[in-house]
Amino acid sequence: MASRWWSVGMFLGAGLLAACPAGKPADGAVSADRVGPCGGLESSSCHKAEGMVKAASGFGNVRHEYLIDPASAMEPGRCVTRNEQGAYEILPARCAEGKAAPAAASGEAGKVDFTYVGISVDHHLVSADADLVPWASVGASAAEKKISLVAMAFVRDQDPQFFAASAEVAFDGKQCAQGRATHFVGAVKVGGMLAYEMRVRGAELRGGALSFFKARLAAGDKRITQTVVGGLEVEGLEGVTGTPATPEQGAAGADKPLTFRVKNPVPVAYAVYPLADVCKFAFPAPEVSPELVEFGDVPSGQAGQRLLHVVNRANLDVRADLGTQSFSIPAQGSLDVPVSWTPTGGGLGCERQERQETLIFTPKDGSAPVLPKTQSVRITERVRTGKETFTRQEHVDTGVFTRPDYAQATRQWECPADYALRSCRTESLQCGDASCTEKGYAVNASPEGNGCKFTCNGPKGLIPGLSSYFCRFDAVMECALRCR
């Protein structure tokens, strides 16, 4: 494995933050003294921030710990200690050393396989409902804290990083130790970040993390600025409602999955691993991405499939079980594991369904002296589903007359919400004593908007009873599921 020691100084202990001069905003930053709909933000940025606030509740909490900071000042392997609030402090000692992987990674390098929207305090990710009061006194200086609403996307590294214990770590036969260290700075994560951030006095911090930021945004706090790193673009934020979907609501309450694109991937974060992961006989938890699997729009009864990228961080081959499927992953290797879902429920329109599955990992060699004996990773999956097609059909007949009212044969239909027009057609055509393309007859079925317009025209007689004309056909409109 080639060496990849990028530094991401996003950090970490408040003491380190206090010692570092403030850097320039990354590309795309907006000055705090500009007044817009959300205080310091322009209109488009304001709408994105509002969408991120609504989207944050749908992401929950990340399973892995990350330290985020695009200032590039961190060093993988450094020891860190975690306090009760979840804040990390960098220690001077080194707890881990990088090492080459014996097996080549599989999968598509550069693919976005981790996305997240949430809140950070001094660059530590916190849960949406985290109480901010304890954070007011974290670190050497409680005078000011940076609260950020962040969207992140990591791209897959074809050359993942693995670690072994450094010479400074002691092993007593049962566990590893290095001073106050509880964790160490692990693999660098490359990707992009979109952040709306502000610095506030510690005394201002109160309530839940997401609620606090939402309130400041709604109040037009001029301290809020935008920062874009790595050219991250998040599409779909303007349409986020944040309202849970129900079958009755259909698309009105079900947001589409957001689309994350990273134009210029750069180091934005580090994974943080427990010190025990590099201890002798350790069985560290594999890394699985994405943690939130969006199947997108899958019609009811059809199978959707996605891939989970699994990186085995252990020094031994492991077996992965997902339902009835089993997979083998080599020591410090990786594998793309397929996961499929055939949603049920044939209601008209879209509804969002969610479920959880668990990947169980065990050593292929059942006698391997490792702890723990098994590892498990729970994956959340989401899908938008509904009846695949909607068909409307009607028999149209002008009646037999000397002078038929052909306008009565006109039909103008629209596809239901969540459906897009697939086709308009006529069947079983009958027109007077000729075909429907002769003697002035014309039957038309044409797309109009998101629906169909059906018309019939033909000849008319002058003397009643001398001649009779009519137009008959079946109007058929087909619409295909397209969640909005």
Image (spheres, helix red, strand yellow):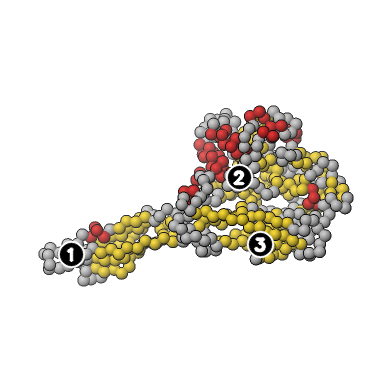
Label 1 vs 2, first from the N-terminus: 2
Q: Secondary structure at mark 2?
A: strand
| Amino acid type, label 2 | Val
- Kindly tell me whether residue 104 is visible in this rendering: no
123 with respect to 90 (left or right): left
Question: What residue is shown at x 66% (from left), y 48% (from top)?
Answer: 62
Name the residue tied to disc 1: 401
Foreground disc of the pair 2, 3: 3
Tell me residue 44's x, y (percent): 51, 39
Question: What residue is shown at x 80% (from left), y 40% (from top)?
Answer: 91
Name the residue tied to disc 2: 117
- On residue 454, the disc is none
Spatial separation of the CA atoms under disc 1 and disc 2: 67 Å
- Kindly tell me whether residue 68 is visible in this rendering: yes
Label 2 vs 3, first from the N-terminus: 2
Q: Secondary structure at mark 3?
A: strand
How dense is the environment of label 1, judged by Cα within 10 Å: few (below 14), some, or many (20 and up)?
Answer: some
Spatial separation of the CA atoms under disc 1 and disc 3: 69 Å
Foreground disc of the pair 1, 3: 3
Q: Evaluate if marks 1 and 3 touch, with contact meaning CB atoms under 8 Å apart.
A: no
Location of the N terminus by quadrant is bottom right
- On residue 322, the disc is 3
